[in-house]
Image (cartoon, rainbow, N blue to C red):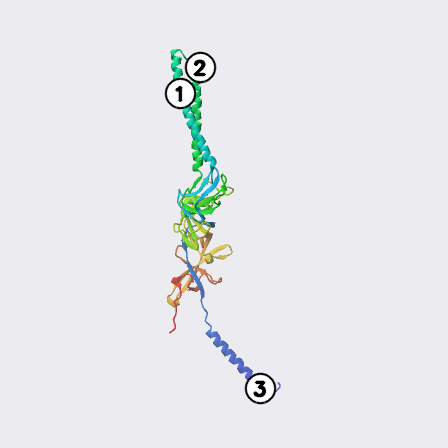
Amino acid sequence: MALIGGRGLLALTLSIAAGLGLAACDDGAAEGVEIRDARVRIAEVRELVPEQNSRHLVLLDPWRRAQLSPRYGGQVAELLVDDQDTVQAGDLLVRLIDADARGSLMSAQASKTSASERLDDLERQLADARELYASGAGTRREVERLETEIATTKASVRQAAGQILQSKDRKSANAILAPFSGVVTNVGVELGEYAAPGSPMLTLSELDKLAIDVPLSETEVAIHDRGQLSFEVTIRDAAVPAEVEWVAREADAGTNTFTARLRVTNGSGELRAGESVSVSVRGTVGKPVLAVPPTAVRWEGKQAYLLRASTEGAGEEARERLERVDITVHRDVGEGVAIEGPVKIGDRVVSSGPATLVDGDVAVAVPRADDPAQAEPETTRG
């Protein structure tokens, strides 16, 4: 064995000392390690009712809208409204000039007067002819001729009376009146312009009530018929009350949806036709079921299970003892998932935590951010 020099011996001594020091440090570090319990979030088993939910983005419509057109046409003599004017039912909006209607009325009145006078004269002649025929001085043929002429003249009187009514109707049609109270939303004619029969002149909209048309599925209609369908209307990010006016009994053309008409009161005039509306349709479709958050369901192969939590201890020493409970998973219900198994309403289960947790483990429950009751108390610095 070769002898070690002074410097070599010193280096060996320092190396051994360093190794012993590191070992001592490692032992101390190992003794200082704290093994912490897993941290989990807890949720409760709830009872939920399965719902049929749908959401629709539609537009506000006027409760009523009418395009006003002349029946006979004529020149615009008076235009008494402008865009966005508010009018009442029966107000005069436009007056037309129709020379033909005035001439027809005068002609019909003259024809009726003439026919009536002729009828009176013929009836007197018939009375005289009958007296002569009775005395043997007249003929039966003359009596029959006068009777025929009287019948023809009566028909002429009736025809003239009908022409008078038609002419008066045509003359009155020259006055365009508001059929209901509302707002003039469009004026399509100008003063002095000729308005052809049937051409739109004005658009009148009833805006103190507004309509919302929502398409419903066959299932939703069936739920509505049971009285279990509700509508939530949101306009400008605010909830607005609405009432169901009717639900169509016939599907919309080319679809299998049925229109539901909702009524929104707009007495203040703040809402405007054409605004976007969000309508949420909700209806119950079954019996109440047990449900948990989807994140609470764990899987081992094809078997679903929950980790039910039971609190042991109190205060800072409180821990959750976990127990595996096998369940059957059904469809989604709202924000949860329907389950079936040996659990009941109010049972506390792990909704999130390490995937390695198993039956019998111990964990620490941490508060949920959305649960004020479980929020950690605030600390203040002195």
Query: Of all residues shown, which one is farthest toward the right?
Result: 2
Q: CA distance from mark 1 to mark 3?
A: 164 Å
Q: Earlier in the sequence, mark 1 or mark 3?
A: 3
Question: Which numbered mark, 1 or 3, is in the foreground of this view?
Answer: 1
The answer to whether residue 68 shows anywhere in this view is no
Q: Which secondary structure lies at badge 1?
A: helix
Q: Which residue is mark 3?
A: 9
Q: Which residue is mark 2?
A: 141
Disc 2 crowd rating (10 Å Cα; few below 14, some 14-19, many 20+) is few
Q: Earlier in the sequence, mark 2 or mark 3?
A: 3
Q: Which one is nearer the viewer's eye here, 45 or 381?
A: 381
Q: Earlier in the sequence, mark 2 or mark 1?
A: 1
Q: Where 5 sits versus 320, above or below?
A: below
- Residue in the picture at 53% in, 80% down: 19
Say which amino acid is labelled 1: Glu
- The reply to whether the C-beta atoms of the residues labelled 2 and 1 are less than 8 Å apart is no
Q: Which one is nearer the viewer's eye here, 32 or 137?
A: 137
**Which quarter of the picture shows residue 165?**
top left
Q: CA distance from mark 2 to mark 3?
A: 171 Å
- The reply to whether the C-beta atoms of the residues labelled 1 and 3 are less than 8 Å apart is no
Disc 3 crowd rating (10 Å Cα; few below 14, some 14-19, many 20+) is few
Q: Which residue is mark 1?
A: 123
Whole-percent x, y for residue 245 in the image: 41, 44
The circle drawn on residue 198 is none
Whole-percent x, y for residue 254 in the image: 52, 42
Say which amino acid is labelled 2: Arg
- Residue in the picture at 40% in, 20% down: 123
Query: Of all residues shown, which one is farthest toward the bottom?
Result: 6
Q: Which secondary structure lies at badge 2?
A: helix
Q: CA distance from mark 2 to mark 1?
A: 16 Å
Whole-percent x, y for residue 237 in the image: 43, 55
Q: Which secondary structure lies at badge 3?
A: helix
